[in-house]
Image: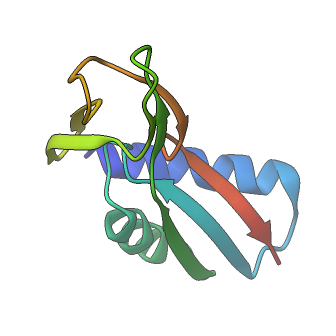
């Protein structure tokens, strides 16, 4: 259960930042290997916190000069395959490739 490990890591990090958490807001990048709704479901099952999860669209930069959203070729449980929509090479991810804690209450 990959999503449980990710959720447990989010919980540990949140508790390092704040005690007595009642609500958490998280941003899940579209290039992350887990879907935003999966993160939300697992966190709800493991905590009594109010959970808000937003999906962050990707922003990439490629050596061909393209800068914009990634071309997602395939995404499944535990993986995301993407490339540059202009030249099809592997780009540098600027945004939307990770999970971030945005707010804790």
Indicate left or right for 73 with 53 as reference.
left
Callout count? 0
Image position, residue 6 (x, y; %): 45, 46
Q: Residue 91: x and y, percent?
A: 39, 22
Give residue 84's quadrant in the image.
Answer: top left
Q: Residue at x 69, y 57 (%)?
A: 101
* In the depicted structure, whether residue 46 falls above or below residue 73: below
Coloration of the structure image: rainbow
Residue located at (57% from left, 61% from top): 27
* 77 over 88 or under it: above or below: below
> Which residue does the image show at 57% across and 79% down from the upper left?
52
Nearest the viewer among 13 and 84 is 84
Measured as percent of width and height from the top left, residue 11 is found at 62, 55
Q: To which quarter of the image does residue 14 belong?
A: bottom right
**On the rendered structure, is 36 left or right of 72?**
right
Which residue lies most toward the front here?
A: 65
Q: Residue at x 82, y 48 (%)?
A: 16
In which quadrant of the rendered image does the C terminus lie?
bottom right
Left or right of 73 in this view: 37: right
Nearest the viewer among 90 and 40 is 90
As drawn, 58 above or below 41: above
Q: Is residue 45 positioned above or below 61 on the image?
A: below
């Amino acid at each position: 259960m990959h999503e449980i490990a990710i959720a447990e890591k989010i919980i540990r990090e949140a508790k390092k930042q704040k005690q007595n958490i009642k609500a958490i807001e998280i941003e899940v990048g579209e290039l992350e290997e887990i879907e935003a709704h999966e993160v939300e479901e697992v966190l709800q099952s493991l905590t009594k916190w109010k959970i808000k999860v937003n999906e962050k669209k990707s922003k990439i930069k490629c050596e061909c000069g393209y800068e914009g959203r990634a071309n997602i070729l395939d995404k499944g449980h535990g993986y995301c395959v993407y490339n540059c929509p202009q030249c099809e090479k592997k780009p540098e991810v600027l945004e939307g490739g990770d999970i971030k804690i945005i707010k804790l209450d």
